[in-house]
Image (cartoon, grey):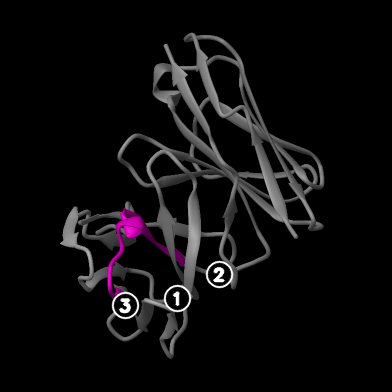
Amino acid sequence: RKEVEQDPGPFNVPEGATVAFNCTYSNSASQSFFWYRQDCRKEPKLLMSVYSSGNEDGRFTAQLNRASQYISLLIRDSKLSDSATYLCVVKTGGFKTIFGAGTRLFVKA
Amino acid sequence: SQTIHQWPATLVQPVGSPLSLECTVEGTSNPNLYWYRQAAGRGLQLLFYSVGIGQISSEVPQNLSASRPQDRQFILSSKKLLLSDSGFYLCAWSDGVRYGYTFGSGTRLTVV
């Protein structure tokens, strides 16, 4: 089993749609969780941290379920500019950080 | 504010040639520094990390090496490149476990 697993997609959605990504992790000792966005041929950029209580940033909502060991990202009212690959990132104590392989999203007009 | 610089942006090198990629960070002291590689269509693979000058930890065996000659400088090297070294190399820094990474703009290396 991979340490961090994501559905590779691609997810093809129309503008204005709501889309959700899930990510599961295997190490119950994981401490910090993030979602990154990576545009084609560019570096990953931090989208948002994921907190235990859940957190929202505009159209983006992230949630963490420690009992089931998964995190999720919800994008509401999708825009064309949301088209990218979304990476789930899990940090365990020390310097061990695992990046998921990413989920590709295409938002179409 | 903190910035991270990485160069060159693209590189085409023949098999067996040496490699040197440089990364510098500004606006922070004693950062944790990382080198990652991303193969085409794959996830990020941690190659090296450093918690201080001269302190390098290697995550995977390979023909690459890293050095940290100054607090905010991190260098990735190879004496002889292999075809399998092709990929997108990313330098990153972080303040600790609670915080995410900030990546440089990356170097796209093609070994021919």
- Sequence-wise, the earlier of marks 1 and 3 is 1
- Residue type (three-letter) at the residue carrying disc 3: Gln
The residue at the point 32 percent across, 68 percent down is A26
Q: Which mark is residue A69?
A: 3
Residue B31 placement, left or right of A14: right
Region rendered in magenta:
A75-90
Q: Mark 1 lies on which chain?
A: A
The C terminus of chain A - image quarter: bottom left
In terms of depth relative to the viewer, which is nearer, B104 or B15?
B104
Q: Name the residue under label 2.
A: A93
Q: Name the residue under label 1.
A: A29
Residue B109 against residue A4 in the figure, above or below: above
- Do tags 3 and 2 sit on the same chain? yes
In terms of depth relative to the viewer, which is nearer, B2 or B72?
B2
Q: Which residue extends farthest front?
A: A109
Disc 1 and disc 3 in contact, CB within 8 angstroms: no
Residue B109 against residue A72 in the figure, above or below: above
How far apart, in angstroms, are the residues tagged by discs 1 and 2? 8 Å
Q: Which residue extends farthest bottom?
A: A53
What kind of element bears circle 3?
loop
Q: Quadrant of residue A60?
A: bottom left
In terms of depth relative to the viewer, which is nearer, B97 or A57?
A57
- Residue type (three-letter) at the residue carrying disc 2: Gly
Q: Mark 3 lies on which chain?
A: A
Percent coordinates x, y for residue A66 in the rendering: 36, 83
Disc 1 and disc 2 in contact, CB within 8 angstroms: yes
